[in-house]
Amino acid sequence: MRGASREDDLAYTLIAERPEDHDAIERVLDRAFGPGRFAKTSERVRERGAEFEPALSRVAVNDAGEIIGVCRIWRAHAGAPVFFLGPLAVDPSAQAAGLGLALTRDAVAACRAVGGQAVVLVGAERFFRPLGFTLIPRGRVSLPGPVDPRRFLWLELRPGGLDKVRGEVGPPVR
């Protein structure tokens, strides 16, 4: 997918994540979040066996061929199969251009296209609301660590997709 911001004339292409993108993505994540990114509760979900889905994850590549953003998707389970979104990061030099929403929108569309039922994430409701994310009702879903309930969101990808989602987000059930 090709996109451009009207504000900054930031041109970019969204593609599925590739193995060769790893180092560049790590640099974007470090610049966006700093060293504290590994202390986040969301990281516990990934460490405990959520399965990374590079084909559903998206990276933004600028016209110079540099990766300037990433939205990662993980297969997980919370009473039913769910996708866990994160991290979502845009290089500080490219922030405020709508790239984060574009990355998320494209990754969510990929999840929907493969038959996914729901997406769960930790993030700012105000940012994710335009894409249809809403607060998870208190006590319905948990993470393996503390999470601010005002930042714990979900999105139904198809009718009834949230009906069985409950409990702690963990690795997919095989």
Image (cartoon, grey):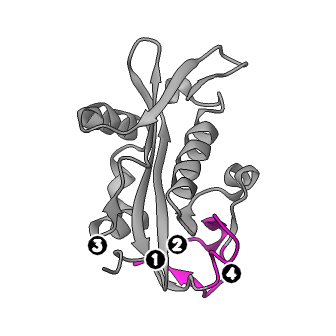
Q: Earlier in the sequence, mark 3 or mark 1?
A: 3
Tell me which numbered mark, 4 or 1, is placed earlier along the sequence: 4
In the rendered structure, find residue 137 and report the number of the disc placed on it: 4
Q: Which residue is mark 3?
A: 48
Placement of the C terminus among the 4 image quadrants:
bottom left
Residue that appears at 38% across and 47% down? 55
- Crowd class of label 3 (few under 14; some 14 to 19; many from 20; radius 10 Å): few
- Observer-side mark, 4 or 2, equals 4
Look at the image and give the residue range highlighted in magenta. Answer: 136-163
Q: Name the residue at 65% across, 75% down.
A: 136
Say what secondary structure mark 1 lies in.
loop
- 160 over 114 or under it: above or below: below
Which quadrant of the structure image shows residue 129? bottom right
Which comes sooner in the sequence, label 2 or label 3? 3
Which dot, 2 or 1, sits closer to the camera? 1
**Amino acid of disc 1:** Leu
Q: Is residue 84 above or below residue 164?
A: above
Q: Secondary structure at mark 3?
A: loop
Count numbered badges in the picture: 4
Horizontal and vertical percent position of residue 143? 46, 77
Horizontally, is 142 left or right of 55 in the view? Answer: right
